[in-house]
Image (spheres, rainbow, N blue to C red):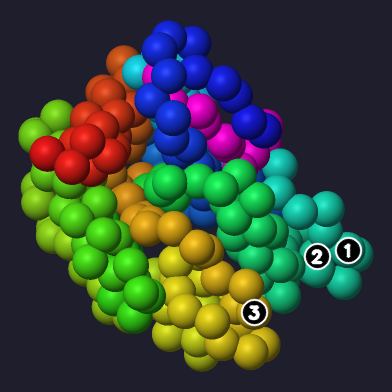
């Protein structure tokens, strides 16, 4: 869904990808005795970020606006209500196609992290180092990471290339070795890659109860969105 600016005219488009959705809940944690799904938090933050960026004069395109996959999944891409590896890859490729069709200046994919140790929390950001615009993607990732750590007071877990994601890669991306949204062309994995600088942010951990309390709270979601707005503005202004 594309949304025009509500104030001013910056002349640039920001593509926001709220991670997961529909039959793909992402990481699931607990905050104050309630279940918290990554897919819900990413959409809530993305919606708030869209409003902020539109007020700054940017055109915004959202990969999804409801609790759904982006692509209409075939029955073979679901297994017991869960997305198969092929379903995930198809959905991610559709997000890429949307970003490219939007002629976006920048792609920001919002996720939240998870780990088997609930004491682990903090912020990390990823970019792909093999694209022609890798330098710009790195600068975007650094600007987003700095703004998130500053805005949230979170532990700085660093900026990483997407071949360092390790176990966090989807099953669909393991053999590819990159984040499908950000990575280079490779037959059978990504035929038409994203054509703009991009980064994937993991502002907090769903599995850390303290982090989960922030990302599931309306005020916390607004803080995350404000930090992302600041990082995107810094990157697009070239400052």
14 up-or-down from 91: above or below: above
Separation (CA) of disc 2 from disc 3 = 22 Å
Name the residue that disc number 3 marks: 191
Residue placed furthest toward the top: 7
Do tag 1 and tag 2 residues touch (Cβ < 8 Å)?
A: yes
Tell me the crowding category of disc 3: few under 14, some 14 to 19, or many 20 or more residues within 10 angstroms, Cα based: few
* Range of residues picked out in magenta: 57-67
Tell me which label, 1 or 3, sits earlier in the chain. 1
State the predominant SS element of the stretch in magenta: loop
Q: Characterize the local packing of mark 2: few (<14), some (14-19) or many (20 or more) Cα atoms within 10 angstroms.
A: some
Residue 116 vs 26, above or below: the answer is: below
Residue 86 in view of the camera: yes
Q: Horizontal placement of 95 versus 209: left or right?
A: right
Asked if residue 58 is among those painted magenta in the image, a careful observer would answer yes
Work out which quarter of the rendered image holds the N terminus and state it. top right
Residue 239 magenta: no
Mark nearer the N terminus (2 vs 3): 2
Q: CA distance from mark 1 to mark 3?
A: 20 Å
Q: Nearer the viewer, residue 29 or 22?
A: 22
The residue mark sitting in front, 1 or 2, is 1
**Residue 154, quarter of picture:** top left
Toward the viewer: 110 or 118? 110
Disc 1 + disc 3, Cβ < 8 Å: no
- What residue sits 44% from the left and 58% below the top? 196
Label 2 sits on residue: 78
x and y, in percent, of residue 90 in the image: 71, 67
**Above or below, comparing residue 78 to residue 163 in the picture:** above
Name the mark nearer the viewer: 2 or 3: 3
| x 82%, y 58%: residue | 73
Residue that label 1 marks: 74
Q: Is residue 109 visible?
A: no
């Amino acid at each position: 869904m594309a949304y025009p600016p509500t104030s001013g005219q910056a002349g640039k488009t920001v593509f926001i990808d709220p991670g997961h959705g529909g039959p793909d809940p992402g990481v699931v944690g607990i905050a104050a005795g309630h279940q918290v799904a990554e897919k819900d938090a990413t959409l809530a933050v993305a919606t708030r970020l869209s409003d902020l960026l539109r007020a700054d004069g940017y055109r915004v395109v959202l990969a999804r606006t409801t609790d759904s996959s982006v692509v209409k999944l075939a029955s073979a891409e679901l297994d017991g209500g869960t997305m198969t590896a092929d379903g995930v890859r198809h959905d991610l490729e559709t997000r890429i196609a949307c970003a490219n069709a939007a002629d976006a200046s920048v792609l920001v994919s919002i996720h939240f992290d998870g780990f088997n140790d609930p004491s682990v929390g903090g912020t990390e950001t990823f970019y792909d180092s093999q694209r022609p615009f890798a330098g710009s993607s790195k600068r975007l990732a650094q600007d987003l990471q700095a703004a998130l750590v500053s805005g949230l007071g979170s532990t700085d877990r660093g900026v990483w290339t997407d071949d360092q994601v390790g176990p966090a890669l989807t099953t669909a991306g393991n053999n590819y070795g990159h984040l499908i949204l950000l990575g280079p062309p490779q037959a059978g994995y990504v035929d038409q890659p994203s054509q703009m600088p991009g980064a994937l942010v993991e502002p907090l951990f769903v599995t850390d109860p303290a982090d989960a309390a922030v990302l599931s709270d309306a005020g916390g979601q607004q803080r995350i969105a404000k930090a992302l707005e600041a990082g995107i503005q810094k990157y697009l202004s070239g400052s």
